[in-house]
Amino acid sequence: MLTLTHFLILSIILFCIGVTGVLVRRNIIIVLMSLELVFNSANISLAAFSYYLQSLNGTIFVIFSITIAAAEVAVGLAILVAVYRRRKTVYVDELNVMRG
């Protein structure tokens, strides 16, 4: 049977993979996917605590968080497409100038 500890360990592993991806990788797409891993690790923790505490507050917050994450991904990808069209690159190191 799965316990709260199992879910928290999974959440910690996903969080560490996400943070490592954000800090190490230079491709914007990989960085955005790593950020989503971090957000999903928080959602797993909230859902696990909600289940084990028999409260719907965490579950409702997870649903709102997933909705906001979907909107964030749509905006992030739109910005990524605009940057790629303008600069012809998706690497963070080459996008160090903020001027048009």
Image (cartoon, helix red, strand yellow):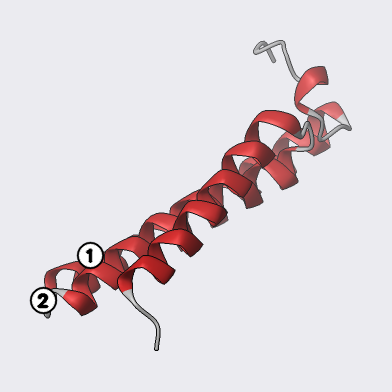
Establish if 37 lies above or below 20: below
In this orientation, which residue lies closer to the viewer: 82 or 93?
93
Residue appearing at x 39%, y 61% in the figure: 8
Residue 92 visible in the shown view:
yes
Work out which residue is located at the far bottom of the displayed protein and give it.
Answer: 1
Residue 10 at x, y percent in the picture: 50, 63
Mark number, residue 77: none
Residue with the mark numbered 1:
61
Q: Quadrant of the N terminus?
A: bottom left
Q: Position of residue 46 (x, y in %)?
A: 28, 63
Q: Secondary structure at mark 1?
A: helix
Please give the name of the residue rendered at 46% of the width and 60% of the height, measured from the top-left corner: 9
How busy is the neighbourhood of tag 1: few (under 14 within 10 Å), some, or many (20 plus)?
A: some
Residue 36 at what x, y percent from top left? Answer: 54, 53
> Label 2, label 1: how many angstroms apart (C-alpha)?
11 Å
Which one is in front, 52 or 66? Answer: 52
Q: Where 47 sits versus 98, above or below?
A: below
Apparent side of residue 47 relative to residue 21 in the rendered image (left or right): left
User: Could you tell me the amino acid type at mark 2?
Assistant: Ser
Picture residue at 68% right of the left edge, 41% below the top: 21
Measured from the top left, where is residue 64 in percent x and y?
A: 28, 65
- Mark 2 lies on a secondary structure that is loop
Q: Which mark is residue 55?
A: 2
Residue 95, located in which quarter of the rendered image?
top right
Locate residue 88: give its quadrant.
top right
Please determine whether, in this image, residue 77 is positioned above or below residue 8: above
Disc 2 crowd rating (10 Å Cα; few below 14, some 14-19, many 20+) is: few
Give the left or right position of residue 60, taking residue 35 as reference. left
- Residue type at mark 1? Phe
Q: Earlier in the sequence, mark 2 or mark 1?
A: 2
Res 75 seen here: no
